Image: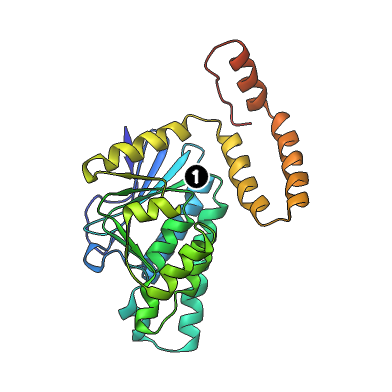
Amino acid sequence: MSTLLHPTTTTETTPLLRRDENGVAFLTLNRPAARNALSIALMTALEAELAAIARDEAVKVVVIGGAGPAFCAGHDLREMRATPDRATYEALFSQCSRLMLAITHLPKPVIARVHGIATAAGCQLVATCDLAIATETARFATPGVNIGLFCSTPMVALTRAVSRKAAMAMLLTGEMIEAREALRIGLVNHVVPEAALDQAVAELAGKIAGKSPLTVAIGKEAFYRQAEMPLEAAYAYAAETMTRNMLARDAEEGIDAFLQKRTPIWQGC
């Protein structure tokens, strides 16, 4: 059964929709007429929902998708130009950074469900999510350079998801890349036909939701922390993490279940 925490209507008065099913929270960016541009209201709603999910033990995985013809076209340029002053821009980009960090720090994996376009901060959102599945017709770009605004904040996530050369090519040309190219450079994990997108996302989310939530949380935090460390420090931190993990009940249960050839029963502790 699914739990609807927001209306299912696709009116822009409700910028974010949530549906829970089988331990997965499906969050839908709901500004289809604006290609789901990240308005202040949408980012605020997404931040609040992620904070609630962090406390919700029933949720094991998060999926972020977009309503209408696109995933996300980046920031709302009309909203940005409506109040063209330093304080407004500082607050906007600070909020966007908080949102991306909230995804990274969330102790549950986040999957991007991508169709249509994912551009600028929308591409940043894909790069920030832990995993991404895209349709064959999805396209990606950091096109700020084309309008005199280098995609500096999207650059942070992009350079941590793909190689430097691939990131620089996207950032300096502003050109769209196809889904298969996004797969080749590591921006997405899988590319599927549009008709198979929901099934592919559900299968991946279901596989992860069946793991120990404690182990997944420990692993996600460790992944991002060690990636920013020098090699020796990373190994020392990882060894301590493994030790802490081994002392958890779920590790004992998982190992015993493997040795006894049975399905483990996770306790989340």
Image height of 126 relative to 244, above or below: below
Name the residue nearer the viewer: 267 or 164.
Answer: 164
Q: Quadrant of residue 258?
A: top right
Return the x and y of residue 263 as percentages of the image width and height.
52, 16
Q: Quadrant of residue 21?
A: top left
Residue 178 seen in the current view: yes
Residue located 39% across and 79% down the image: 145
User: Among all residues in the image, which is located at the extreme bottom?
Assistant: 85
Label 1, secondary structure: give it: loop
Image height of 258 relative to 213, above or below: above
Report the coloring of the rendering: rainbow
Q: Quadrant of residue 264?
A: top right
Return the x and y of residue 92 as percentages of the image width and height.
46, 75
Residue located 41% across and 67% down the image: 121
Residue located 57% across and 38% down the image: 216
Left or right: where 186 falls relative to 31:
right
Residue located 44% across and 31% down the image: 207
Return the x and y of residue 83 as percentages of the image width and height.
38, 86
- Say what amino acid the circle numbered 1 marks: Pro
Name the residue nearer the viewer: 148 or 205.
Answer: 148
User: Among all residues in the image, which is located at the extreme top?
Assistant: 260
Dot 1 surroundings within 10 Å: few (below 14), some, or many (20 or more)? Answer: many
Image height of 184 relative to 215, above or below: below
Residue 65 seen in the current view: no
Left or right: where 264 falls relative to 149:
right
Quadrant the N terminus occupies: top left
Return the x and y of residue 94 as percentages of the image width and height.
52, 73
Left or right: where 203 falls relative to 230:
left
The residue wearing badge 1 is 109
